[in-house]
Amino acid sequence: MSMSITFTEPATMLTDYALGTLCSIFGWRLWVKGRDAISVSVMYWAGGMGSLAIASFAGGTVHGWSLMLAAPVLLALWKGSAIAVGLATFCFFAGTLSASVGLPLRRWLMLVPWLQLAGYLVWMVGHTDFRYVIYNYGGTFAVILLIQAYCGLVRKSPSAWWIVAGVSVSYLAAFVQRSRIAPHPSFNHNDLYHVIQMAGVWLLYRGAGLLRDR
């Protein structure tokens, strides 16, 4: 007796897995680079990429395997994906501060991402709507965008415009997803979001590799 496997959203699952694989590779490369250079900022960004990879794999599993997994498992995966995105946001923010703000001011400012992460985790315990993930991610990226634009214009930091471009592409991806722009019935807005986000994380990766601790 054979058992057939039916994937609910195969394109979304595969593009999510592809994004997760890409983030895993970038995260590992940044970790090695940051470890060898003893760069806290680069290692924070490596952690952010790794967290995004976890979020993508968990999200892809929810989209693809929803007919074959129990409801508590799906909820745990969805919550895990949301928490992983929050961790990625924290790492990107902390890494940006480490590369942009000198001591002793940085010691105080580093409280901001920690408090933000704590507040986000407490909020997401009782909420499942993905829009809260987008609000947290998008708001933090706005701050990162401003900091990096300043670093690019004033300090001429080589990393700045790569990260600005990566954040801008990430915003484009989020706009496509929220607007439900779908080029084909078999390739929906989530699939297009993942593809555009792949370009965004590549740009972020290029910029993160050029960060230097202050």
Image: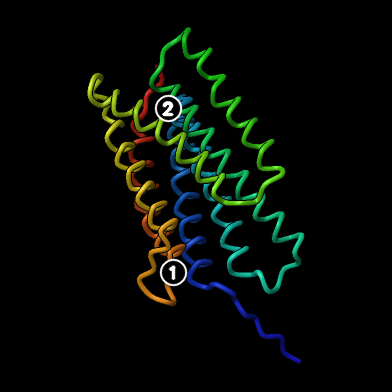
Q: Residue at x 75, y 64 (%)?
A: 71
Amino acid type at image mark 2: Thr
Q: Quadrant of the N terminus?
A: bottom right
Where residue 159 appears, as percent x and y from the top left, is 30, 31
Secondary element type, mark 1 = loop
Where residue 7 appears, as percent x and y from the top left, is 59, 76
Q: Residue at x 65, y 81 (%)?
A: 5
Dot 1 and dot 2 residues touching (CB under 8 Å): no
Which of 128/18 is in front? 128
Q: Residue at x 39, y 47 (%)?
A: 201
In the image, is 124 to the left or to the right of 86?
Answer: right
The furthest residue to the top: 104
Quarter-wise, where is residue 145 in the image? Answer: top left
Which of 84/79 is in front? 79
Quarter-wise, where is residue 123 in the image? Answer: top right
Q: Which residue is mark 2?
A: 96
Label 1 – label 2 distance at C-alpha: 33 Å
Q: Which one is earlier in the sequence, the residue at label 1 or at label 2?
A: 2
Q: Which residue is mark 1?
A: 188
Q: Residue at x 44, y 23 (%)?
A: 97
